[in-house]
Amino acid sequence: MQIKAIHFYILPGEPIVRAVDGGNGGMEQPPQSWTGMFTHSHGLRGGLGNPSVLYRDDKPSPTFRSVLRVVTDGELSAYTDFETGFHADDLVWKARQFMATIAPMLIGIDAFDREHIWQKLWYAQRFFYTGRGMVDTIDTMLWDLFSRHARLPIYKLLGACRESIPAYGNIGGTTIDEYIADALRVKELGYVGAKDHSYRGVKGNIQLAKELRAATGDEFFLMHDPVECYDYDEAVTVGLALQKYNYKWMEEPLQDFDFLGLKRLSDRLDLPIMAMEWIGSLGGQPFNASAFMAQQACDILRQRAVGITGQIKLAHLAESFGALVHGGNHHVILAIRNDPVFEAYMGIKPRPPESQLDCRGTLVVENGAMSIAYNDRRPAEPDWDDYKRTALEVVV
């Protein structure tokens, strides 16, 4: 299925009232910390912190969106919403930039040669300063195209490892009692565990761990994600307590750039350490994960690899070291063995009626597990003639 052309459709969007809300908290030092580090006040004291600053327009503003279409010599196209904005002219010029730099790399290539395209765009990041988003977008589009062509969900095309995976929920609060109530709510919903994002300092988080374990019982999974708010000594102190309370892991305890600290911490604790959420999201995964694995700087890799193709690479890299990965695309998760539990940050997602399913699959989170519901129905192609008629401009 050869790529023949690239089209951008610049379309009117729905008017919205523009607003900026600064009420999600600021940055402050954790309690009892002598390190001088800062953390997000939202995880420390809820939404408190900086005074709330709100800018809000008094009337709706027009919006615009661009749709990227990869035209093939077959009956199907790859497509995605590419950009949104308040000025159509900006979207036109961004589309033109794509047409001048990225499109020539795609024209004439078989759309099913995803590895070839992924490799080309991976290296183009350096020379065209595209960032990871370009590789993510194109790779996901091409996997979606393959799914519709084959009438199978992506996880089946990757070579499914399982049909479902246990799921846990995230919990929060401004007091320990609120965290406990949230954990019990998550348990009542059928989740197998819960993860906190608490930045209450060493003493506060140890007390939280103790009371969460007492409230939820011995079999309920508990995980702690302090989001880089410890130094090495603090992480050791908290980690030893988490071991005592049978936690499954500690996630992002140190900054990902503190390679030596993570190595020392992983050596010091029996508790598994997860890392690479931040440095992975910047775009270096899967390749920058090899040093973490080779030097045993962490036990679990946070899945942030570029594109579905990159996520499979990272999962297989970790597996070759006998290590786990966690997170990422739900299709990838069901196609691998070494991600033990699904983070249901989106909450409960009941299985939709059969009439709403198609071959691409729909994420389902219910009864304490994640799965993908699908059938063999191929969704109808967009009406590209209608797109052309309603577009403010078509960039080709």
Image: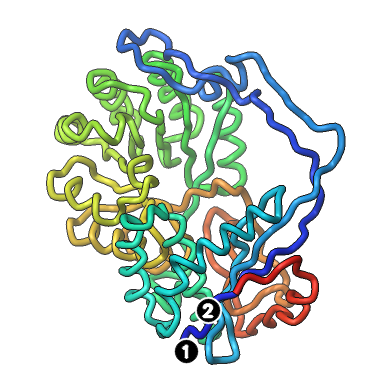
145 w.r.t. 362: above or below: below
Residue type at mark 1 is Met
The image shows residue 317, relative to residue 260, as above or below, that is below
Q: Contact, CB < 8 Å: mark 1 with mark 2?
A: yes
**Residue 2, image x, y percentages:** 46, 88
Q: Quadrant of residue 340?
A: bottom left
Between 93 and 53, the one lying in front of the other is 93
The one nearer the camera, 190 or 46, is: 46
Q: Helix or strand or loop: what does disc 1 sit on?
A: loop
Q: Position of residue 3 (x, y in %)?
A: 48, 83
Quadrant of the rendering where the C terminus is positioned: bottom right
Q: Of the residues under marks 1 and 2, which one precedes in the sequence?
A: 1
Q: Mark 1 highlights which residue?
A: 1
The residue where tag 2 is placed is 145
Q: Which mark is residue 90?
A: none
Report how far apart the C-alphas of labels 1 and 2 lie in the structure. Answer: 10 Å
